Image (cartoon, coloured by chain):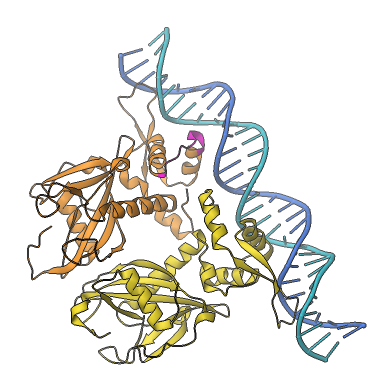
Chain colours: A yellow, B orange, C blue, D cyan
Amino acid sequence: MTKQNEATILDSITIDCVIFGFNQGTLEVLLVKHADGISKDKWGLPGGWIFTDESTDAAANRLLLELTGIKDVYLEQLRAFSEPDRFPLSRVITVGYYALIKKEDWTGLKPGATASEVGWFKVSEVETLIYDHLHILGVGLRRLRRRIKQEPIGFNLLPEKFTLLQLMHLYEEILGYEMDKPNFRRKILRMNLLTALDEKQKDVSHRAAKLYKFNPDTYQKLIEKGFNFEF
Amino acid sequence: MTKQNEATILDSITIDCVIFGFNQGTLEVLLVKHADGISKDKWGLPGGWIFTDESTDAAANRLLLELTGIKDVYLEQLRAFSEPDRFPLSRVITVGYYALIKKEDWTGLKPGATASEVGWFKVSEVETLIYDHLHILGVGLRRLRRRIKQEPIGFNLLPEKFTLLQLMHLYEEILGYEMDKPNFRRKILRMNLLTALDEKQKDVSHRAAKLYKFNPDTYQKLIEKGFNFEF
DNA sequence: TCTTATTTTAGTCCAATGGACAACTTATAG
DNA sequence: CTATAAGTTGTCCATTGGACTAAAATAAGA
């Protein structure tokens, strides 16, 4: 986190991003190991500075693209984190974001990224991070838990095509409790948000589950009719 | 909005606050008229600078105390607003807050406040504000609508003692639709959040309604048992 | 072809809830 | 005494959520 161009970068404000991914039934977060500075060799959230001519939203999107090479990511601001002593060297306020990415799109660190090392970690196993990043992660997780019950954003963590059971496992992992399979099916299908595909799972040693995809357009139309997603 | 002390105030970050009040069945917001500068004589949200040794939460609380003289106000951060051109003279990011105050506590502008004029306006009738303040107000209103369904925060807008019908009217006004009296009573009383008082309304030309108060301690205990407020 | 695994799918049961509605009771000011 | 508007009780019904049972389907592998 070194400033590259004093003239075009905002002083004393940064962004930090909680990037969630879902892999084999567990919720993961992308962390970076700092290459130098006072937090050398310690893990933290990916972050960066904000150009004077861009919004924080734009800065967060740029960071995400730089770091992952992925465009059009689900991204939402958490809030500003501003404790005076949160950053030990100077007074820096950070604007936190969280992002949901499909791990299938992740092809490894983009060449030329500044961090010395990046890695995916199980959210439940992250215990220490630099500065107040553990706190920001916690806020991000709570926000995700709340949002996923009110808006169909979970699909951003799954591949384009998924089975209902995968979706249920996603909910179970994030919310932290188990669900009933038949009831889950009924409830989610009743909403008419999913399109059943003519495809099935492959390479499984049991009856292959049908694949579905989430239909954002349908969702929009339902919203306009007053539909209220709720889980 | 002029800087008073270059040395102890953060550059390029401000706070702005949407202060809601409830008066005779309508939701109101506190606005200030700027005394000078490019937005002289125009209405906007109350805002201010942040000291280098305080968090934005602390700054918002300080602002509220300076402006209203009221302590212990319900206050929640909305988020950072950061469009590069939101403030015409320079690049300023603002952290938005919204607050709920009991209008009975409001005794007029605190002497010595900087704004030339302050006033309460019906939220539904506010049409123009300086900078992006109308946008911030909108975000605040949406947040209030969402929160009031999930957490018992509406009481912060009512007097200490209130009738069930007053509470219902508060919900109706904020959410924008009418409710059924008997059903509302049943639902809210079933939650056991309210303590019935031995007092009644006075000076009404009909049967006086019983007064209730909200009990935060009871709420806390219920939360710990897994209770989930929902309206 | 048979077995095994696990999903898909259909269906039941019950308690709780929300919404709509009717109607009666009470108390207060004037 | 009366008009007023709140309090209060209760019914009805459609919907939902949760718990549970169990049968049918199908893909891989032996």
Q: Residue at 45% of width from left, 72% of height from top?
A: A72
Looking at the image, residue B105 lies above or below residue B7: above
Q: Position of residue B177 (x, y in %)?
A: 45, 39
Q: Tell me the magenta residue range.
A: B175-183
Q: Quadrant of the N terminus of chain A?
A: bottom left
Q: Quadrant of the C terminus of chain A?
A: bottom right
Q: Position of residue A178 (x, y in %)?
A: 60, 68
Decide: is A106 above or below C9: below
- Asked whether residue B126 is in view, the answer is yes
Q: Is residue B11 left or right of residue A218?
A: left
User: Is residue B100 shown above or below B199?
Assistant: below
Quarter of the view holding residue A24: bottom right
From what the image shows, is residue A188 above or below residue B208? below
- Left or right: residue D12 versus residue A77 is right
Q: Nearer the viewer, residue A219 or A82?
A: A219
Residue D7 image position (x, y, % from top left) = 44, 30
Residue B181 painted magenta: yes
Image coords of residue B165 (percent x, y)? 40, 35
Give left or right: position of C3 versus A161. Answer: right
Q: How many marks?
A: 0
**Residue at image coords 58%, 63%:** A215
Quarter of the figure with residue C9: bottom right
Viewer can see residue B69: no
Is A75 covered by the magenta stretch? Answer: no
Residue A85 or residue B203, whichever sits in front: A85
Of residues D6 and B64, the one drawn nearer to the viewer in this rendering: B64
Which residue does the image show at 63% across and 58% down from the upper left? A187
